[in-house]
Image: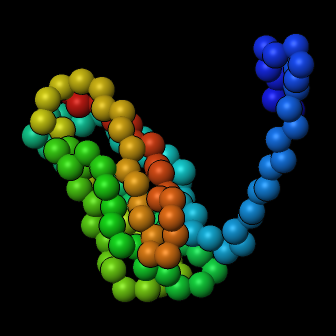
C-alpha cells in the first residue's frame, strides 16, 4: 500500500508485477575491492559473467581514467572480464562499472573500490 496525506484516500493499493529472468547473466564476484595500489602502478582483477545460454557483452562502461576493462565480444556462456586499476593520484576510489549484455535492457552494475597510495 501507498500512504497519502489525503483524507479522502489515505491509502492506495499499487499492484506490483515481478518478473524473474531465469538464466539471466550474473557477475561473480558482485563487487570488486582492489588492494592498496601505489600511484603509477597497476593491479588486475577478474570478473566472471555467466548465464545458462550463450550471450554477448556489447559494452562495459566505467571510470576510464583509472579503470580499463578487457573482454571478448563473441557469444559464450562464461565471459572473463579483466579489470585493470591504474591510479593517477593518491586517495580512495569508489566507482562502478556497467556491463551491457546484448538483448538486455538494464546493465549489470558492479561496485568497484580501491585506494591509491
Task: Kindly indicate the quadrant of the structure image that contains residue 69.
Answer: bottom left
Q: Quadrant of the N terminus?
A: top right
- Residue at 59%, 84% (x, y): give it: 53
Residue at 24% x, 24% y is: 91
User: Farthest residue toward the front?
Assistant: 8
The image shows residue 93, relative to residue 52, as above or below, that is: above
Q: Nearer the viewer, residue 37 or 27?
A: 27
Which residue shows up at 31% across the image and 55% down it?
A: 61
Q: Is residue 108 left or right of residue 20?
A: left
Instruction: Give the vertical position of 83 relative to 85 (above or below).
Output: below
Q: Is residue 43 visible?
A: no
Q: How many marks?
A: 0
**Residue 48 on image: x %, y %:** 48, 66
Closest to the observer, 38 or 72: 72
Near-viewer residue (24 or 34): 24
Residue at position x 88%, y 37% from top?
13
Tell me where residue 41 appears, x and y as whole percent.
14, 43
In this view, 10 is above or below 28 = above
Give how far across and how far down residue 54 sits, in percent: 53, 85
| Quarter occupied by residue 100 | bottom left
The part of the image, by quadrant, that contains residue 81 is bottom left
Residue 25 visible to an observer of this rendering: yes
User: 74 or 42, which is in the foreground?
Assistant: 74
Is the image coloured rainbow, by chain, by secondary structure, or in one colour?
Answer: rainbow
Image spot of residue 55 (x, y percent): 49, 81
Can you say which quadrant of the picture contains the C terminus?
A: top left
Amino acid at each position: 500500500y501507498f500512504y497519502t496525506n489525503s483524507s479522502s484516500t489515505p491509502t492506495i493499493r499499487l499492484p506490483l508485477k515481478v518478473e524473474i529472468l531465469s538464466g539471466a547473466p550474473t557477475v561473480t564476484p558482485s563487487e570488486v575491492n582492489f588492494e592498496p595500489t601505489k600511484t603509477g602502478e597497476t593491479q588486475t582483477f577478474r570478473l566472471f559473467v555467466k548465464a545458462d545460454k550463450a550471450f554477448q557483452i556489447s559494452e562495459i562502461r566505467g571510470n576510464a581514467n583509472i579503470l580499463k576493462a578487457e573482454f571478448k565480444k563473441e557469444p559464450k556462456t562464461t565471459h572473463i572480464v579483466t579489470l585493470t586499476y591504474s591510479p593517477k593520484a593518491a586517495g580512495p576510489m569508489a566507482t562502478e562499472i556497467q556491463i551491457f549484455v546484448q538483448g538486455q535492457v538494464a546493465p549489470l552494475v558492479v561496485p568497484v573500490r580501491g585506494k591509491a597510495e
